[in-house]
Every structure is written in structure tokens, then in C-alpha cells.
Image (tube, grey):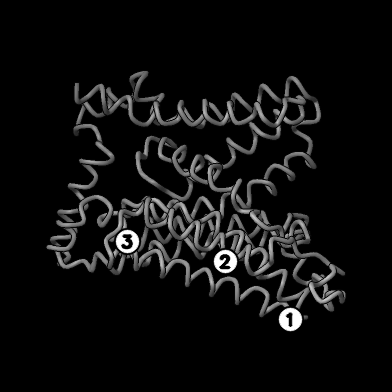
Amino acid sequence: MQAGVAVLEANLHRERLEPVQAGAEAVSEKRSLPGVVQRYGSLLAIAAVVVFFSIVNENFLSYDNLADILRSISIVTLVAIGVTFSLIVGGFDLSVGSAVSVSTVLSASLMVWYRQELLVAVLVPLLFGLVIGLVNSFLVVKVRIPDILATLVTLYIFQGIHLSYTHGYSIYNNMPLTDGSIAPGIMIPSFLYIGQGKLWGIPVPVVIMGLVVIAVHIFLSYTKHGRFLYVTGGNSEAARLSGIPVNRYRTLAYLLSAFFASLGGIVLAARIGTGQVMAGSPLLMDAVAASFIGFSILGQGKPNALGTFCGAILMGVLMNGLTMMNVPYYAQDIVKGVVLAAALAVTYLPKLRKTA
């Protein structure tokens, strides 16, 4: 089995990463202008954007503003890490927005409506997130509905569930209940610390984001399970013939996708101090954009944790800088689309050039 996996990994690298040929040809191609753009274009774009905004606004590089950027991208990064896992196995999880919304209102309601403590307010939404992942994997793996359609179905289902659960109302301290009484609980300080506190001067959401990115990078790059996920996404039939339990790894990917989306929802609830309905919907496209921008980081050409993190940084810096320049919010989506198109062009144009 190990020999078969080694062959599969070699084929996967040739098909998806398309490394240049050995010897002088590889060195010359990496040093060529297209090769440099493919490997470092996104990083250079991040640097250029930072330099531009620091010139037009002297407060851009202040500690407080940089901390705000990192805090703002922490939730998007967590959700994007979930999307990254689904992309690794050749899928695409559209339900992460609903998973965020469900965990946000569920954690808030457990404290405000039912006076539960921190452990329950964190564990129950995470467990419910795993339920969402199981439903997704059942529809994709067992029922064999195409992943985009299956997760679109669950997006609507769990969106409806969380709206029905809250009757369409956001959850907050001292809110009136349907029977005319006042909610007995509050968003407890220990929970709010997750989104608003600092650890050694660093915002807690940034610490959580950093730990998750590092852990996922190690898992994907240095463990056999991470390699098996990539092999499953590269050629599932060949992986199956080599003895890899393909369905098990596809299920694992959707479980992790929903888990990290739910974790993002918990951090979001702790940050804003309320359980906002439909809070996850705006995060979906930002997370997808960050994941796809990550393909082009260092020319990886595949979903990866560090690339996703860099993609989230690029999106966060852009939105922060545009906001400081008083660019209307409705025009910021244009910039997001242009940046995503440029990142995808950096990823795919060299491949098209080689195959032409």
C-alpha cells in the first residue's frame, strides 16, 4: 500500500502542482519572469497593497490598525480553512456560511436563554457543526449528489433551521422572549474573552487563528492522513485501488470543514457579543476567495493552510485600506472580484501556456 501511495503522490504532483523538469531546465524556469510571478505574485501583491495604503494613510501601519486587521481576518481564516479541506478532496463546501450562523446563535442562546456556562456554550455548537459535516458527507459520499448541489441543499436547510430556532430574531442580553418575559441569562465574560480578550497583548481570536493555521499546516504537510487527503482529491479512483479508504477521507474533509466553520461562528459570537441571525452569509464568499487566492501562494497550485491564511490577509488588508479611504462598502466587492480574478490568473495561466 505504501508503495502505491508513493506512486500516487508522484502522479499527483505532476498533475496538480506540475513541477518543472529536473536539472538546468527546472532552475531556468523557476528564475524566469512567469515562474517568479507564479511563485511570488500573491506575496508581492500583499506587499504592494500594504505599501500603497501606508502611503495614503499614515495610520495604516499603526499597531492598533494592524491588530484590527488580524482580528477581522481571524474568523474568515477559520471558515476558509474549512473550505480548504473540502477543496483538497476535490469538493466544495457551500454550507460553511450556515454552519457559522447556526453555531453563532446556538452558543448565544445557550447562555442567554438557558443560562449555560462556557463549556456547554462551546462544545454544543462544535458538536452540531460535526452533525452538519455528517449530513454533507452522507449526501456527497453515500447518496452521490454532486458536492456543490449537496452543500447548497444543506446551506438552505440549516439556514432555515437556525432562523426557525430563533424565530428570525438575533439573541442578546436582556432580550424580550415570546412569552413577554426577559431572557434570564447573559453572554458570560469568559465566553466574550474568546472574541474580545487579549493574551500577552495579542487578541485571542488572532491566537486561535495562528494555532489553527499552524496545526492544519503540520497535519496536511507532515502526516500520512494529510497526504491521503491530497491523493484522494487528485485521483480518487487510483487512491481507492491503492488501498486508501477514499470515502472515509472525503467524510473527514467535510467534518473538518463544518467543524472549523462552527469554530469561526463561536469566535464571531464572542467578538460581537450577540447571536446575529444570518451572520455567516457574508463570510462565505470571503472564505472562498481566501482559499482560492491561497492556491497561488509560492506557486503551490493546490489548497493549503498557509496560502489560505495569506489570502485572508490580502482580503483583510484590502477591505481595511478601502474603508480607511472611505470607499463605499458596495464598491468594495468590485475590488474583491478583481483580486480573486488576478490570483486565479496567476495560478492557471502558466498551466495553460504549457499545455498550449
Does residue 319 appear left or right of residue 309 in this picture? right
Q: Earlier in the sequence, mark 2 or mark 1?
A: 1
**Quadrant location of the C terminus?**
top left
* Residue at x-position 20% and y-position 31%: 23
| Mark 2 → mark 1, Cα distance in angstroms | 21 Å
Q: Which residue is mark 2?
A: 161
Badge nearest the viewer, 2 or 1: 2
Q: Secondary structure at mark 3?
A: helix
Residue 192's image quarter? bottom right
Front-most of residues 148 and 294: 148
Bin the neighbour count of mark 2 within 10 Å (Cα to Cα): few under 14, some 14-19, many 20 and up: some
Q: Earlier in the sequence, mark 1 or mark 3?
A: 1
* Residue at x-position 42% and y-position 48%: 304
- The picture places residue 27, in percent across and down from the top left corner, at 28, 27
Q: Amino acid at mark 2?
A: Ile
Q: Secondary structure at mark 2?
A: helix
Q: Which residue is mark 3?
A: 140
Front-most of residues 303 and 133: 133
| Mark 2 → mark 3, Cα distance in angstroms | 20 Å
Q: Amino acid at mark 3?
A: Val
Front-most of residues 329 and 150: 150
Badge nearest the viewer, 1 or 3: 3
| Mark 1 → mark 3, Cα distance in angstroms | 35 Å
- The picture places residue 145, in percent across and down from the top left corner, at 30, 58
Residue that extends furthest to the front in the rendered view of this protein? 179
